[in-house]
Image (cartoon, rainbow, N blue to C red):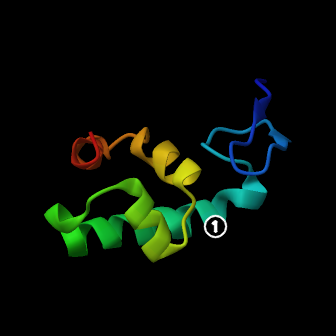
Amino acid sequence: MEVKRCSRCGGFYTFDGNVCPKCTNKDNFELSEFKNFVEANGVEIDSLAQVASQTGISEKNLNRFLDYDGLEGYKELFD
């Protein structure tokens, strides 16, 4: 069993996933908000800082979301 460190809260956990069970719901909510914001605003987005200020999601978490499987196309918007 592999012990991982949660990238949101820093706690340790032992199951598969990007964050610990305590942070999973918040992570899923923010990821959904991020996707909805990008889909609604697309090419009008200038930076992750803009997304962070308009959604309330930290730039740290936005950068982490860009590394998730299936979000490769989103990463291209911010290069």
Q: Toward which corner of the image does residue 7 lie, by quadrant?
A: top right
Q: Nearer the viewer, residue 71 or 17?
A: 71
64 versus 25 height, above or below: above
21 versus 78 height, above or below: below
Q: Give me the residue at 40% from left, 65% from top.
A: 51
Q: Nearer the viewer, residue 14 or 46?
A: 46
55 versus 22 height, above or below: below
Q: Give me the residue at 25% from left, 63% from top.
A: 45
Residue wearing tag 1: 26
Q: Give coordinates of residue 1: x percent, y percent.
A: 78, 24
Asked whether, in this view, residue 67 is left or right of residue 41, the answer is: right
Q: Give me the residue at 29% from left, 46% from top.
A: 78
Please tell me how many numbered marks the rendered image carries.
1
* Residue at the limit of the structure toward the left, as seen here: 43
Q: Give coordinates of residue 79: x percent, y percent.
A: 26, 39
Q: Give coordinates of residue 4: x percent, y percent.
A: 75, 31
Asked whether, in this view, residue 64 is left or right of residue 7, the answer is: left
* Residue at the limit of the structure toward the right, as seen here: 11
Q: Nearer the viewer, residue 49 or 56?
A: 49
* Residue at the limit of the structure toward the top, as seen here: 2
Q: Give me the residue at 19% from left, 65% from top.
A: 42
Q: Toward which corner of the image does residue 11 lie, by quadrant?
A: top right
Q: Amino acid at mark 1?
A: Lys
Q: Give coordinates of residue 46: x percent, y percent.
A: 26, 59
Asked whether, in this view, residue 79 is left or right of residue 55, the answer is: left
Asked whether, in this view, residue 72 is left or right of residue 50, the answer is: left
Q: Tag 1's secondary structure?
A: helix
Q: Residues within 10 Å of mark 1 (few under 14, many from 20)?
A: few
46 versus 29 height, above or below: above
